[in-house]
Image (tube, rainbow, N blue to C red):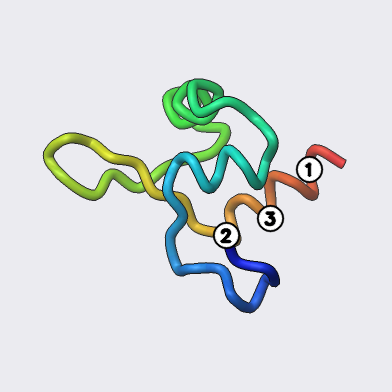
Amino acid sequence: MPKSKDELPKLLTIRQAAEILNVHIETLRRWDISGKLKAIKINKRGDRRYKPEDLEKLMKIKI
């Protein structure tokens, strides 16, 4: 896991995003469906990726 904001990858896996937000991956899936936090689907399987800046916006709202 990256140690600072500057080291964050351009897209985060669902597991990485869940760890950062301290939520379960199923919560992220529900948020994607409801539109609270949209994911980028990257392949035919529908694997989700998240933009770090979207997570930051959500964290500011939650505080």
Identify the residue shown where x is 23% and y is 36%.
46
Q: Which tag, 3 or 2, sits closer to the chain's start?
A: 2
Residue 52 placement: quadrant:
bottom right
Left or right: where 14 falls relative to 7: left
Residue 1 placement: quadrant:
bottom right
Q: Is residue 35 above or below residue 42?
A: above
Kindly identify which residue carries mark 1: 61
Mark whose residue sits in front, 3 or 2: 2
Do the numbered discs 3 and 2 sit on residues whose CB atoms are within 8 Å?
A: no
Kindly identify which residue carries mark 2: 1
Label placed on residue 56: 3
Q: Nearer the viewer, residue 29 or 38?
A: 29
Helix, strand or loop for disc 2? loop
Type of amino acid at the residue the image marks with label 2 = Met
Q: Which tag, 1 or 3, sits closer to the chain's start?
A: 3
Type of amino acid at the residue the image marks with label 3 = Glu
Q: Which tag, 1 or 2, sits closer to the chain's start?
A: 2
Q: Residue furthest bottom?
A: 6
Q: CA distance from mark 1 to mark 3?
A: 9 Å
Type of amino acid at the residue the image marks with label 1 = Ile
Q: Is residue 63 above or below residue 50?
A: above
Label placed on residue 24: none
Mark whose residue sits in front, 1 or 3: 3
Q: CA distance from mark 1 to mark 2?
A: 24 Å
Residues packed near mark 1 inside 10 Å, few (<14), some (14 to 19) or many (20 plus): few
Q: CA distance from mark 3 to mark 2?
A: 16 Å
Identify the residue shown where x is 52% and y is 47%.
16
Q: Is residue 55 above or below residue 35?
A: below
Residues packed near mark 3 inside 10 Å, few (<14), some (14 to 19) or many (20 plus): few
